[in-house]
Image: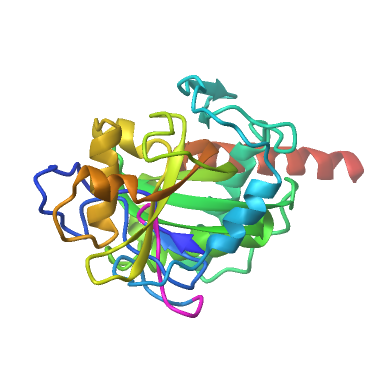
Amino acid sequence: MSSSCCGTKKQKLNGNYSAANGYSTSTNNTGRASNGVAEGAQNNHSYYGRGSGNGGGQQPQQQQQQSSSSSSSSSSSSSAAAGYNGYLMNGHGNHLPQQPSMIGSMPEMCFYCFEVLYRELHNLEEPRTPCFTNDPYPLFVTWKIGKDKRLRGCIGTFSAMRLHSGLREYAITSALRDSRFSPITRDEIQRLTVSVSILQGFEEARGYLDWTLGVHGIRIEFYNERGSKRTATYLPQVATEQGWDQTQTIDSLLRKGGYRAQITLDTRRSIKLTRYTSQECQMSYNEYRDLLEKQSHYHGQLCKMQC
């Protein structure tokens, strides 16, 4: 299922939540998520930020849980940003043996997302097949703009997708079909930064506090005041970016998922929470162009040698 991952500005935790302000909405049966929360309708072309749902998308998480070891605590250390060849990398959580680090290939994924979007906006043919792994993972693609990196689009999926087709689809979907924003234009591309997040290590938590700030992303299932099942999610970086503690994060996620009644301790305890980790990489347009020029120079030199 799909969800949104990021917000447009910091929320005020006063009980009044605008759909455009945060990282979530509700979900039902699509595989698509926007602004940090899974949501949508029955097809792959639903819009994002206002779905109501029946809690679909659980099966993909169960599949992820089967491929990860069960941990009974959330004692992972806080994530640290690390540089890889100059690109901002974030590893949220410890990577399990079945889920190897992809730090070395993630800059290529960011490059590929820029290639896909640039060619889409200029009506060019699709880029050639990338060289990084095509294994299936849940993923998110986020576009931000300007020096202050304002959110410009963010959509992903909790269903494991082959990375080549998944990144191609969500690079375009998050840029052009996030209903909170107008589609990204040709004039804006030079000011963009792209982030790719690969989600891993899904585990069912023992309670609503059984996760670690800055390490785990969380997905909650709950029943709203009308008795409808809803789901919502935040990526690992959301809470720390907003400056929230765990309870504030849960309350915000409930509101973003459509819960309008008073939030009590019993409300929080009734939540079913799944935690997960992610690997993330960011790349600016200038970095993309630098790589593109280096590739062109390399291929030019290779052609001369072959001739």
Q: Is residue 264 magenta?
A: no
Q: Is residue 37 magenta?
A: yes
Give the image quarter of residue 155: bottom left
- Where is 291 relative to 81, above or below? below
User: Looking at the image, which is closer to me, 102 or 15?
Assistant: 15
Residue visible at 34% across and 51% down in the picture: 270
Q: Is residue 141 left or right of residue 71?
A: left
- Where is 246 relative to 138, above or below? above
User: Looking at the image, which is closer to me, 271 or 95?
Assistant: 271
Q: Position of residue 74 (x, y in %)?
A: 49, 28
- State the residue lying farthest toward the bottom: 42
Look at the image and tell me whether residue 146 can be seen.
Answer: no
Look at the image and tell me whether residue 291 can be seen.
Answer: yes
Give the image quarter of residue 38: bottom left
Residue visible at 68% across and 36% down in the picture: 69
Q: Position of residue 25 (x, y in %)?
A: 31, 61
Q: Is residue 102 left or right of residue 170?
A: right
Q: Position of residue 30 (x, y in %)?
A: 49, 72
- State the residue lying farthest toward the right: 306
Q: Which residues are magenta?
A: 35-44
Residue visible at 32% across and 30% down in the picture: 240
